[in-house]
Amino acid sequence: MNNTYLDLVKQTFNFPQEGFEVKDEYLQFNGLDIKALIDKYGTPMKLSYLPKIGMQVKKAKKMFETAFKKYHYTGEYNYCYCTKSSHFSFVVEEALKQDIHLETSYAYDIEIIKKLYARKKITKDTFIVCNGYKQKPYTSRIASLLNSGFKNVIPILDNKDELQAYKKTVKMPFKLGIRVAAEEEPNFPFYTSRLGFRPRDILEFYVDKIEGNEDRFQLKMLHIFLNKGIKDDIYYWSELNKVINLYCQLKKICPELDSINIGGGFPIKHSLGFEYDYQFMINEIVRNIKTACKKSNVPMPDIFTEFGSYTVGESMAHIYSVIGQKMQNDRLFFYNHPAGYLGHWGTLPDAADQ
């Protein structure tokens, strides 16, 4: 019987795979010699392989391009990076090298936007999608960006009162988005997302509060995000299609509306057993939007995404040393390391052999 850890991995998973391989009996992470790094810096160690960020962005852009060609989709695709996933300057600036846009969640994110502009990493044409529940420090900073000429800053309204803050403080015409509150899965602690408008309230809100004020503000975007992420199941497609159908309804009375933002939610590799068909999901998203628009005889919207973990998660790694082994029963070994325990099932070699 094979009894090395590498043999166990090969018996259990398809290995080697993207990002991981073994060279000269030592693990390589995106081509990096992990053993050499351990010898130099010791453990525990955290590392970021910045080129992986660009690889992820290019991969998503290419897949959307493929889907657009497949279905003759006439809208545009805009990739936004969700800054809350990692605020480190070297991460955000690496992502921006791929000609992308940004999404913010908090008041202090606006200070990051200002710093990036001062360092000429973005321009006033860059899309800045402003999400989240917004108190005065956040809305006032958004207004300051708009008043200073950031014409593609889009505050996404989370509730009916938020618009009033911009009406009082923004001195020039600006664009708006509305977040649609999703119905959560039955096993989720909350029945409905705490963020966004109830779908049945949006049409009325548009007619009462936005329509007729086009010289001051225009509705550009509908936004949806599901806590469970983008998954191929009835729940996801049902919620997505609610927003698509709402877009089709609104587009007939709101010609300025031209974008659907599907948020983030692409999963990333958390184990060697990870499987996910990104291209299939993108194809189906594009196909669903086109089909609904064609049926309603309205133009296809631009598609925005806000991938955060997908952008940076697979560029990072934590390296630990195994300092001991502990058997709790006949099947489970715990490998002790300085940050806690790693549990493994099955018969593994002694720690002394690793």
Image: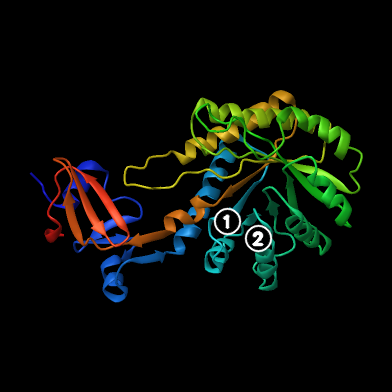
Determine which quarter of the picture holds residue 331. Answer: top left
Q: In the image, what residue occupies the spot 61% across and 52% down?
A: 80
| Drawn side of residue 96 relative to residue 280, left or right | right
List the single residue furthest toward the left. Answer: 1
Determine which quarter of the picture holds residue 118. Answer: bottom right
Q: In the image, what residue occupies the spot 53% across and 59% down?
A: 86
Asked if residue 15 is positioned above or below residue 91 in the image, the reply reads above
Asked if residue 210 is positioned above or below residue 136 in the image, the reply reads above
x and y, in percent, of residue 230 in the image: 52, 38
Three-letter residue code for mark 1: Lys
Identify the secondary structure beneath mark 1.
helix
Q: In the image, what residue occupies the spot 70% across and 55% down?
A: 127
x and y, in percent, of residue 348 in the image: 15, 48
The residue indicated by pointer 1 is: 84
The quadrant of the rendering that contains the C terminus is bottom left
Q: In the image, what residue occupies the spot 19% across and 61% down?
A: 25
| Residues tagged 1 and 2 counted as in contact (Cβ below 8 A) | yes
- For label 2, count other residues whose C-alpha is less than 10 Å away and answer few (under 14), some (14-19) or many (20+): some
Three-letter residue code for mark 2: Asp
Determine which quarter of the picture holds residue 137. Answer: bottom right
The residue indicated by pointer 2 is: 109
Identify the secondary structure beneath mark 2.
helix
Q: Toward the viewer: 35 or 329?
A: 329
| Drawn side of residue 285 relative to residue 211, left or right | left
In three-dimensional space, the C-alpha distance between marks 1 and 2, rounded to whole angstroms, equals 8 Å
First-in-chain label (1 vs 2)? 1
Q: Toward the viewer: 74 or 61?
A: 61
Q: Toward the viewer: 102 or 189?
A: 189
x and y, in percent, of residue 35 in the image: 26, 68
List the single residue furthest toward the top. Answer: 295
* Residue 194 - label: none
